[in-house]
Amino acid sequence: SSALKDTLRELIPLQRSRLKDLKTNHSNVKIDNITVGSIIGGMRGNQSMLWDGTTLSPNEGIKFKGMTIKQCQDSLPGIDGIFLPESMIWLLLTGKIPTMQETKSITNLFNEILKSQNNCLPIEVDSIMNNLPKDLHPMTQLSIGLECLSNNSSFANLYKDGKIGKNDYWDSTFDDSMVLIANLPLLIGKIYSNLINNGKSLGSINNSMDWSYNICSMLGMTSTKDSINKNNLNDKQLIDFNNLMRLYLGIHVDHEGGNVSAHTTHLVGSTLADPFLSYASGINGLAGPLHGLAAQEVVRFLINLEKNVNDVNDNKLIESQIWEILNSNKVIPGYGHAVLRKPDPRFNVMLEFVENRQQEFQDDPHVQLMQKLSTLVPSILLKHGKCNNPYPNVDAASGILFYHYGIQELLFFTVIFGCSRSIGPLVQLIWDRIYGLPIERPKSLDLKTLEKLTTSR
Ligand code: FAM
């Protein structure tokens, strides 16, 4: 058992009884109207799923158990003023702000899991990952790796042997989820070394360090002897990179339940597929260009723009380049959002990271351009008059910061995103099983029926 699991166990009776009350006494209460527009429009805005960890507010952005990013920064335990993703796991799963000790108990749990595997991927997973074509899409590699990990799923094994009843499903789902998250540093390291180092390891796991550190280490990017790559960075830069990783991993964990990776994990999980298969499905969704690939689009855009703009202070030229893109009917990557109506607070914290390190970034024309665009683009988009939100979103900054520190394989950014995003959907999957939610099965309608329903109204 672990401190996290013990704390979770205490919450279960009350939460189950709250759900039971809704189910028995209020099942017929109407929440929303479903329109034809929603059925043919990607179910946009339908209020139709239970998701406890996060909610997205158009004006305040993402809220974690009701807390804004700023509040999380102020109250969650961390290192160098940046909260640890482990503290976010505690918050999302229990609804309580953890102490540093509780946060560290999750770090320790991950390290115990890794130690029990000798700090290596399970042998069959390692062998499959080693034999993948080295240029296989990094997201495909991530998906395959997660699916192979399901070989050791406690949940699947106990279920197969008829050893658990519905009330206990959450317990082994919890264990599997922790194993999955704990293994991500190994998996991401394997994928990155496949990409850039012919599969040869770039670093090693340090069992006394936090999850984000070990992700950096396996990318070869720590200031210690744990890593061998380092991209010619000095110690301060490597420590900053570790903090950037903690920040990035902490703020990308979840974005409500309706986005494709979260919803897919929940949907597939509702069949009682194990957590590895469920999250691998979410990862397949994250790999789509309309979902997880935006950060790399922004980097391509900034690199191209920089080629045409010699001076980052030449506002006129930059503005004319932006108009050129808009006039050719293309979007400005990194700007706009389906739900948000203010600058994305996740973007703001990334920008703050840069502003606190002006010396580091002052000679990087791409980062300078990213900053400059955030002051120029909103008013241009307002004049352009089309989009509902002219402000930068999270992806406007993240990719170019990784790029700055030498992670320049653009396809790899989404893999880092996929590490972070494991947290929200897996936490919810544990709760889905605590609540005993049923298999999802919405009703579909054919076109003829839709037409019939519209003409009869
Ligand atoms: N540049 C130019 N036009 C834009 C725009 C932008 N950045 N964002 C929206 N528009 C246009 C949009 O194309 C649409 O035009 P049409 O009426 O001609 O179709 C109009 O403004 C209304 O769109 P909206 O209601 O404001 O946005 P949507 O909810 O339809 O779409 C986004 C939201 C994010 C897909 C859209 O803003 C976009 O394409 N942005 C650029 C790409 C990007 O940054 N994606 C990452 C989003 C990120 F936050 C994430 O989810 N990972």
Image (cartoon, rainbow, N blue to C red):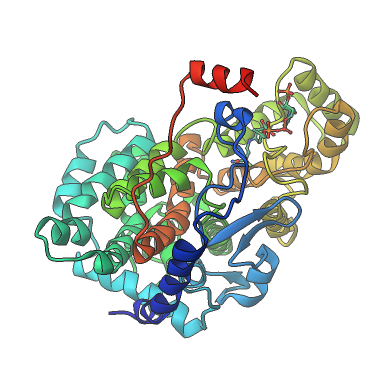
- What residue is drawn where x is 62% and y is 46%? 32
On screen, residue 273 above or below 410:
below
Question: In the rendered view, does 316 fall on the left or right side of 126?
Answer: right
On screen, residue 188 above or below 198:
below
On screen, residue 20 above or below 132:
below
Q: Position of residue 445 (x, y in %)?
A: 46, 26
Q: How many marks?
A: 0
Q: Position of residue 454 (x, y in %)?
A: 62, 21
Tell me the quarter of the picture where residue 55 sits. bottom right
Q: Is residue 114 visible?
A: no
Question: In the rendered view, does 391 fall on the left or right side of 117?
Answer: right
Tell me the quarter of the picture where residue 429 sits. bottom left
- What residue is drawn where x is 26% and y is 53%? 274
Q: Position of residue 19 (x, y in %)?
A: 45, 66
- What residue is drawn where x is 78% and y is 36%? 388
| Viewer-closest of 230 and 66 | 66
| Viewer-closest of 365 and 38 | 38
Q: Position of residue 378 (x, y in %)?
A: 83, 38
Q: Quadrant of ligand 1?
A: top right
